[in-house]
Amino acid sequence: MTTIAAPPRSPAYVRKALYAGLALTLIAVLAPLIDLVTADSIGDHVRAAYPGWSADLVAKDRNAITIYLVAVGVLGLAGWVWSIVAVARGNRRVRGIGTTLFVIGATVQLIGLSVGGEAYTTIVPTFHGVLGFLPSLAGLVAVVGLWRHK
């Protein structure tokens, strides 16, 4: 009779970091949408950069920034869900793919925090850039844990 060994389990803190990253990413996805219908700080950010623009142009730029933030966040959510499932199943490729997802996610968020435009200091408002980067910290904890666990 052949027995099948159970897949190795990652430490609990890795799973907690993955769920924290998922939750932080969900918050980062919802924040610009909530902002859009309440405070409109993204619109204020655009108006501050381009005070001479019409309301229509401001709305178009605000919507483009909001769509970008939500799209990046949704892709991040997919990465977190894949990572959670892969860790739960003991997938041996989770280290490499998880590390790749971390590098891509952190790079995209750092770009969002730092890239400016013609009149923009940064295109993405600082609050949303920092909020979007927070999941990367959870990702760093998870990746380090995956590589330390044997």
Image (cartoon, grey):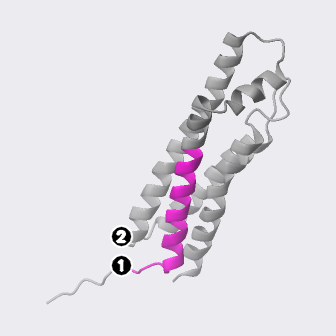
Q: Amino acid at mark 1?
A: Pro
Give the crowd class for mark 1: few <14, some 14-19, many >=20 residues within 10 Å. few
Q: Which x, y percent locates residue 58? A: 71, 17
Query: Left or right: where does residue 97 sit relative to residue 63?
Result: left
Q: Earlier in the sequence, mark 2 or mark 1?
A: 1
Residue furthest bottom as drawn: 1
Q: Could you tell me which residue is drawn at 54 percent across and 63 percent down?
A: 20
Can you tell which mark lies on residue 89? 2
> Which residue does the numbered mark 1 point to in the structure image?
7
Mark 2: secondary structure: helix
Q: Which x, y percent locates residue 10? A: 47, 78
Mark 1: secondary structure: loop
Query: Left or right: where does residue 25 sit relative to residue 61?
Result: left
Q: Amino acid at mark 2?
A: Arg
Image quadrant of residue 72? top right
Residue furthest front as drawn: 38
Rendered position, 85 above or below 56 = below
Dominant secondary structure (helix, strand or loop) of the stretch shown in magenta = helix
Question: Magenta residues?
Answer: 7-29
Q: Could you tell me which residue is drawn at 43 percent across and 71 percent down?
A: 92
In this view of the protein, can residue 111 be seen by the observer?
A: no
Query: Left or right: where does residue 103 sit relative to residue 8?
Result: right
Q: Reply yes or no: does residue 23 show up in magenta.
A: yes
Q: Nearer the viewer, residue 39 or 80?
A: 39
Pointer 2 and pointer 1: residues touching (CB < 8 Å)? Answer: yes
